[in-house]
Image (cartoon, rainbow, N blue to C red):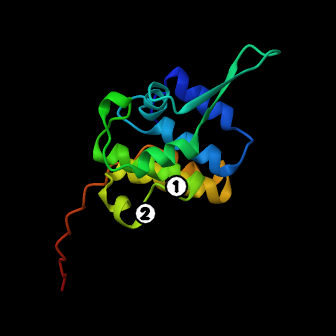
Amino acid sequence: MAEWTPIGGTLVSSAKGRSWREEAACWLLAESGSGESHWPDRLQEAGLLSWETQESEDWDLVFVRWSALAQTLARKDHDPADGLYGTGAEWCVLRFACSLMTGKGGNWGTDLPRLDGSNQRIVLGALAWAAGGEAAAHPYMLPKRPEPEPVPPTPLHIVD
């Protein structure tokens, strides 16, 4: 699992209990990127997060402005100056998260094969979460195990 930035952690905790889809999409955004949350911080820079102050609590809530994100993703040209930038795989993850919430933004058929193994795993985990809750996603949250070394065949010795 990725190390989340404060914004990523707040995004995930704010989504808890809202809907499986929103929990899954926010977890996917926080898990994306190399080493730490990529998209939550970029969405903040682009003005695509909405903050809600909790008067009686010591923390704030943060939510993705999903409709605005879908409109942003519908544009073909993405200017890094707007705060949104990433690799091809990171853009696919962002589109998947948006698609979970809005039905717009992602093309599962063309984007899924473009992902590397770890990004495929978190996208499939988010899909499982959206369909069956957090427990359904647990198998996808585990670190990928290395493939075992093949055992060379032992020659067969026939004894007379």
User: Horizontally, is 105 left or right of 51 in the view?
Assistant: left
Kind of residue at disc 2? Trp
Q: Determine crowd level at label 1: few under 14, some 14-19, many 20+ residues with C-alpha closer than 10 A.
A: some
Dot 2 falls on a residue whose secondary structure is helix
Query: Where is residue 152, by image quadrant?
Result: bottom left
Q: Position of residue 77 (x, y in %)?
A: 30, 45
Residue toward you, 57 or 145: 57
Q: Specify the label residue 99 is tagged with.
A: 1
Residue toward you, 152 or 31: 31
Query: Where is residue 111, by image quadrant?
Result: bottom left
Q: Position of residue 41 (x, y in %)?
A: 46, 27
Residue occupying the far right of the picture: 56
Task: Residue at 54% x, 51% y: name it.
Answer: 126
**As drawn, 50 above or below 92:** above
Task: Residue at 38% x, 34% y: name it.
Answer: 84
Q: Are marks 1 and 2 in contact (CB under 8 Å)?
A: yes
Q: Specify the label residue 76 is tagged with.
A: none
Residue labelled with disc 2: 108
Quarter of the image where the C terminus is located: bottom left
Residue toward you, 126 or 111: 111
Q: Position of residue 144 (x, y in %)?
A: 40, 47
Task: Residue at 30% x, 36% y: name it.
Answer: 79
**As drawn, 112 above or below 35:** below
Kind of residue at disc 1? Ser
Q: Position of residue 150 (x, y in %)?
A: 24, 60
Decide which of tag 1 and tag 2 comes sooner along the chain: 1
Dot 1 falls on a residue whose secondary structure is helix
Task: Residue at 32% x, 47% y: name it.
Answer: 89
User: Horizontally, is 32 left or right of 59 in the view?
Assistant: left
Residue occupying the far bottom of the picture: 160
For the residues labelled 1 and 2, the Cα–Cα distance comes to: 9 Å
